[in-house]
Image (cartoon, grey):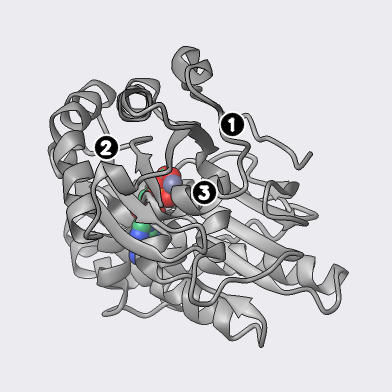
Amino acid sequence: MILALETSCDDTCAAVVTGAGDVRANVVSSQGVHDRFGGVVPEIASRHHLELVNAVVDDALGQAGATLDDVELVAVTQGPGLVGALLVGVATAKGIAAGRRLPLAPVDHLQGHVAANFLAPDPIEPPFLCLIASGGHTLLVHVADHRGYEVLGRTLDDAAGEAFDKGARLLGLGYPGGPALSKLATQGDPAAFAFPTAARVPGLDFSFAGLKTALLYTVRDLGEAETARRAPDLAASYEHAIVEALIARVERALAAAPGARLAIGGGVAANRLLRSRAEALGAGVKIPPPEWCTDNAAMIGSAARWVDPVPYPDYLALDAYATSRRRRAA
Ligand code: KG4
Ligand code: ZN
C-alpha cells in the first residue's frame, strides 16, 4: 500500500492507493479560509496544512481500514506549488517514512494530474494526448509512458483555472472561482457575449489574458447594475470561451495525430462543460471523476507507482520546488 500526501496549494490531501491503482481512501480537506482574500494566501495555507495534515493522514488510513504497518511506500508532492505549503507535506512524509525506514517517492504535481488517468478501475494505457488544465498550469502533452510526458503546447500567459478565477472575481463571485462561475453559467446564455478564444494563437499554445481583459471591459461598459443583471449570461459566455479555446487546441492536436486517444486532468477538468465537450470528441476519451481532477492525493499515489523510490535515509535532504521542473521518462 502507498500512503500519499499532497499539500501544494490550499487543499490538505492524503490517500491510500494500492500498487494496482485501487483507491482505498482519498481525503481532501479544503481550507475554506482564503475566500475572504479572493485567493490563496501562502502563509495561511502553510499554517493550515500544519494543523490539518496529521488528522487528514489518520482519516485516510482509517477509511482504508489500514494502519502505518500496512504502508510500504510514502509518496508526496515535491512541486510545483507554494513552497511553504509543499514543505509541510514533504516534512510530514519524511517523518512518517523515516520513522519506519520506508522508502519515499517524490512526485511532480503535474505528473500527478496525468496519473489520475492511471487509477483503477478504468486506467488508460499510454500512448495518449493529455490536456492538463489547473489553476497554475495549462498544457497539452503527449504521454508516451507512465513516467513522464512531452509538452506539445502550453499557455503563453494565464492558466485556464486562473482565467476562471479572475473572471469569477470580476463578476463578484467567491474563490475558487471556477465552480462558482460554472454554476452561475448554467442559468445563462453562452452566445450572449462573443468573448475571444485566442483563435489567432497558432499551434497548440493557449492564451487567456485577452479573454480576461475582454470581460473586464465588458463589465466596465455595462456598469454595476447591468453586470449584476446579466451575470449569468456573462458567466456562460466566458465559460464557453475558455472551454472552446481548450477544445480548439485539443482538436488541432488530434487532427495532427489521427487515431490518438485523449485524456484530461487538472482542476478545470472537473468543469461540466469541458467534460461534455471532451466526451463529444469521440470514443477513446478518458475523463477521470471530478474528485480525481481537482487536487487530491490519490493521483499522487498513482504517479508514485512509476517513480524510483528513494531509500531511507537518502530522502531526508529532499527539498520542495516551486516552479515546474518536469522529469522526463528515462
Ligand atoms: O488542479 P487544481 O485543483 O489546483 C491546481 O493545481 O491549481 O485546479 C484548481 C483550478 C482553480 O482555478 C479552479 O477554479 C478550477 O481549477 N476549477 C474549475 C472547476 N473546479 C475547479 N474550473 C471550472 N469549473 C470547475 N468545475
Ligand atoms: Zn493541481
Which circle, 1 or 2, is nearer the viewer?
1
Q: Where is residue 198 in the image (x, y as percent from the top left)?
A: 64, 56
Q: Are marks 3 and 1 in contact (CB under 8 Å)?
A: no
Question: How far apart, in angstroms, are the residues tagged by discs 3 and 1?
Answer: 13 Å
Q: In which quarter of the image is residue 155?
A: top right
Which circle, 2 or 3, is nearer the viewer?
3
- The structure residue drawn at horizontal position 32% and vertical position 67%, both measured from the top left corner, is 182
- Residue 149 showing in the rendered view: yes
Dot 1 or dot 2, earlier in sequence? 2
- The structure residue drawn at horizontal position 66% and vertical position 87%, both measured from the top left corner, is 283
Q: Where is residue 82 in the image (x, y as percent from the top left)?
A: 39, 27
Which circle, 3 or 1, is nearer the viewer?
3
Judge from the rendering whether residue 211 lies leftward or rightward of residue 218; answer left or right. Answer: right
- Residue 137 showing in the rendered view: no
- Kindly identify which residue carries mark 3: 112
- The structure residue drawn at horizontal position 51% and vertical position 33%, both measured from the top left corner, is 106
- Kindly identify which residue carries mark 1: 324
Ligand 1 contact, mark 2 (Cβ < 8 Å): no
Dot 2 or dot 3, earlier in sequence? 2
- The image shows residue 172, relative to residue 260, as above or below, that is above
Q: Where is residue 173 in the image (x, y as percent from the top left)?
A: 21, 54
Q: Residues within 10 Å of mark 1 (few under 14, many from 20)?
A: some
The one of 62 and 137 positioned closer to us in this rendering: 62
- Kindly identify which residue carries mark 2: 39
Q: Where is residue 66 in the image (x, y as percent from the top left)?
A: 25, 54
Q: Residues within 10 Å of mark 2 (few under 14, many from 20)?
A: some
Quadrant containing ligand 1: bottom left
- The structure residue drawn at horizontal position 48% and vertical position 32%, both measured from the top left corner, is 103
Kind of residue indicated by mark 1: Ser
Question: How far apart, in angstroms, are the residues tagged by discs 1 and 2?
Answer: 21 Å
